[in-house]
Amino acid sequence: LKQFSHVLPEISLTSDGILLRGHRIIIPSSLQARVIKLAHRGHPGIVRTKQLLRARCWFPGMDTAIESEVKKCRACQATTPLTQRDPIQSTPLPARAWSDLSIDFSGPFPDGKYVLAIMDEYTRYPLVDIVSSTSATSTLKSLRRWFSEFGVPQILKSDNGPPFNSKEYSSFLEQLGVKPRHVTPYWPEANGSSERFFRTIKKTIQAAIVENKNWHEELEMYLLNYRATPHATTGKSPAELLFRHPFSVGFLPCVADIAIDEEVLLRDTAKKLKQAEYANSSRHTKPHNLGVNDQVLLKQPITNKFSPVFDPLPYHVTQVQGNQVTARRGGNQVTRNSSFFKKVEEENDEPEPAGSLNFGSNGLEIQATPTANASRIPGTPVTLPRPIDPQATEARLGPSGTPTGPRRSSRVTRPPVKLQDYLLPPRGGM
Ligand SMILES: [Zn+2]
């Protein structure tokens, strides 16, 4: 009860039997890990995973739970560089949505495909095509479809490499009245947000390859979450800004009544000032936290553009002398500067998320009869969420009762979260 007492005045129950804190759905304890897994699909970082969930749901200790789940994710650990500095976005925010776009390619990926993307600099809404060629013909095919669906922009920024330097490309834009603008990569005018976007989708694709998943599908699921996640600079999700209506991620019912307003521009300006301050402050060098017997990942040489930064099979540390670390894997021993190693957090044993979730109010019983409209019930007695299913806890442990190691082969598959004892809301109610 303590966990809920400070938020009790904000709690209400909808006619569908969904418990809300303000406009956010309260997730019962049995579904919390699964909701985090679904929000982390495509491997966004801790901040983006939090931003996606904070806008839609709540449960006690949510931030801490997200941090620990994402830190444990092996695919993230293998694909995230140790230090990441975001380029400062120095381009001013365009006056309106869909007027200034950036276009770029990423790839080729291991199956020979490329990712062609355009990003709207106002809403940060990306459109992505997986294409077999970087030719002008193929690029114009995507652009024609995108412009017919979303409208024609005023400006289209790109680098000045092929196909963006071709006659075909420039005459196509000219016919439609679009001004092409060539920017040099890494030059201040280059668009920081689209560069950042390409870096994150590259990570998503690497992570899908590490996990032996279909990267085309993982990329689409990542984009769904990306478009629904409030952007750090605008405070609104790209989809809300572009479509002006609530945008559902599917696994959580859409209850938020999202008001879009002029605060976007104010927030953007404030955020950029902060970013500039951060960039100007001195770099901090953190001492390493490695100790003997730690499990670590070793940075690997980049054999192709899509090999992950770290070798996903862990080493274990045998000796630490200042910044010099020695680690062993089988008969293989390496000594490197500590910056070549990343400490392994314990791997998740959660099952793969699949499909959407249904939940009623059972995770948190409120002694009140639901009324036709969402009712506010301050001071009503509340019981704690049910304890974790003991069977599920047992399944996390090995046959001997000790936690299983991170090796896939020794893992016991946990049965899917049981939903049948949840009150299903009336059809069409979610
Ligand atoms: Zn991850």
Image: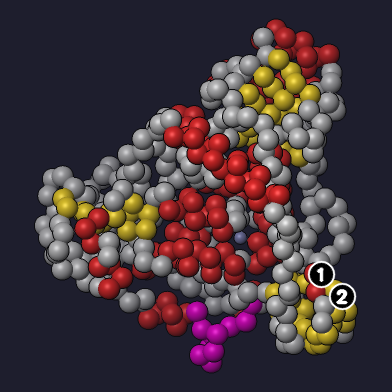
Assess whether residue 400 is covered by the magenta stretch: yes
Left or right, residue 388 beside residue 284: left
Q: Is residue 275 above or below residue 173?
A: below
Q: Which quarter of the picture shows residue 195?
A: top right
Tag of residue 340: 1
- The location of residue 429, given as percent across then percent down, is 26, 44
Q: Position of residue 204 (x, y in %)?
A: 66, 51
Magenta stretch, main secondary structure class: loop
Give the x, y percent position of residue 24.
33, 51
Could you tell whether 276 is left or right of 311 in the image?
Answer: left
- State whether label 1 is within 8 Å of ligand 1: no
Specify start and end residues of the magenta stretch as a single range. 396-406
The three-letter amino acid code for the residue at tag 1 is Phe
Place of residue 326 in the rendered image (x, y in percent of width and height, measured from the top left): 84, 82
What kind of element bears circle 1? helix
Relative vertical location of residue 140 with respect to residue 323 in this rendering, above or below: above
Residue type at mark 2: give it: Arg
Marking on residue 360? none
Q: Quadrant of the C terminus?
A: top left
**Quadrant, the N terminus:** bottom left
- Image quadrant in which you'd find residue 302: bottom right
Q: Nearer the viewer, residue 270 or 22?
A: 270
Residue at image position (40%, 31%) is: 261
Residue drawn at (60%, 56%) of the image = 45
Which residue is at the far bottom? 400
Residue 425 vs 66, above or below: the answer is above
Question: Answer yes or no: do the residues labelled 2 and 1 have beta carbons within 8 Å?
Answer: yes
The 10 Å Cα crowd at callout 2, few under 14, some 14 to 19, many 20 or more, is some
On screen, residue 172 versus residue 389, left or right, reads: right
**Residue position for label 2:** 336
